[in-house]
């Protein structure tokens, strides 16, 4: 028997949009400016979900700069954020096959939205650059709530924005690539899908089944098939 779905929510970086290439580019730029060696791309990708500070610390660690002052660390972080905001969408793109997912949901009248830990000003700018801002039915960012993921509060706010009562959360899917995504979706009573193709550190990849997601998809193609052709979900 298929599950009736009223809405689909996504995490942003590493789940719906592949943003890593722009972060790799900026870390490379900052490294060159300081005559440093840039960290390997694979390591930068693993740190994307952990945020700007984690990527900057990786760059500093790569070049033996772990003992920089807190002020210097904040300065590097701000430079990173400024550079990212200035050129936020040079190489970023919706993951392959997921554009078809979004288009199909829209044709069926099923709203889709984003619940992310990305700062709102950056999330809004990215969606505008990608012409997704008017298509996205709900955007929830850390500034919108008192407790971010893994707390379920952002998920409840998304339901409110979509006009879906909490009691119907089981009719909403949440797709994410981090354990906090799965924890937040499960705590809110949603069905959860782990995007295992996302920005997951190598040491965590052996324990993905323990995260408690209802479904695990290893590629965007698998996610598309699960959502659109598996027969597990029924949409309006």
Image (spheres, rainbow, N blue to C red):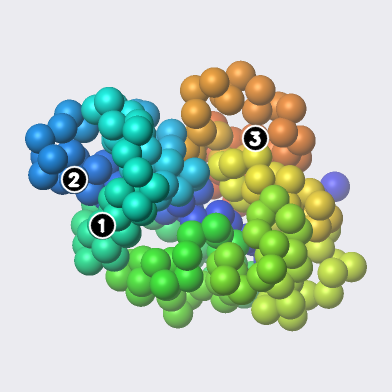
Query: How far apart are the alpha carbons under marks 1 and 3?
Result: 36 Å
Q: Dots 1 and 2: beta carbons under 8 Å? A: yes
Percent of width and height locating residue 94 = 39, 54
Res 132 quadrant in image: bottom left
Q: Residue at x 72, y 33 (%)?
A: 211
Percent of width and height locating residue 190 = 78, 55
Q: Which badge, 1 or 3, comes first in the chain's sequence?
A: 1
In the rendered image of this protein, does residue 235 appear above or below residue 60? below
Q: Residue at x 51, y 72 (%)?
A: 136
- The residue identified by callout 3 is 216
Disc 1 versus disc 3: nearer the observer: 1
Q: How many marks?
A: 3
Percent of width and height locating residue 104 = 53, 63
Neighbours of disc 1 within 10 Å: few (<14), some (14-19), many (20+): some
- The residue identified by callout 2 is 30
Q: Which badge, 3 or 2, comes first in the chain's sequence?
A: 2
Res 141 quadrant in image: bottom right
- The residue identified by callout 1 is 79
Q: Residue furthest right?
A: 167
Q: Return the residue nearer the eye: 154 or 132.
A: 154
Q: Is residue 74 left or right of residue 232?
A: left
Q: Residue at x 66, y 23 (%)?
A: 207
Tell me the quarter of the image containing the C terminus. Answer: bottom right
């Amino acid at each position: 028997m298929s599950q009736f779905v009223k809405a689909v929510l996504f995490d942003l970086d590493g789940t719906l949009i592949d943003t890593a290439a722009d972060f790799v580019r900026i870390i490379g730029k900052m490294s060159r400016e300081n005559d440093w060696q840039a960290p390997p791309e694979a390591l930068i990708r693993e740190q994307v979900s952990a945020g700007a500070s984690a990527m900057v610390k990786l760059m500093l660690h790569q070049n033996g700069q772990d003992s920089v002052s807190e002020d210097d660390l904040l300065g590097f972080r701000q430079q990173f954020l400024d550079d990212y905001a200035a050129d936020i969408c040079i190489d970023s793109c919706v993951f392959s096959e997921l554009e078809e997912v979004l288009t199909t949901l829209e044709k069926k009248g099923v709203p889709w939205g984003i619940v992310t830990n990305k700062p709102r000003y950056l999330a809004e700018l990215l969606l505008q650059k990608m012409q997704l801002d008017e298509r996205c039915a709900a955007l929830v960012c850390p500034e919108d709530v008192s407790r971010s993921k893994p707390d379920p509060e952002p998920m409840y706010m998304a339901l409110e924005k979509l006009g879906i009562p909490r009691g119907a959360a089981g009719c909403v899917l949440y797709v994410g690539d981090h354990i906090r995504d799965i924890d937040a979706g499960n705590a809110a009573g949603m069905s959860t899908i782990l995007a295992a193709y996302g920005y997951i550190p190598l040491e965590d990849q052996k324990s993905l089944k323990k995260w408690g997601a209802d479904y695990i998809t290893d590629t965007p193609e698998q996610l598309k098939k699960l959502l659109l052709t598996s027969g597990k979900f029924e949409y309006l």
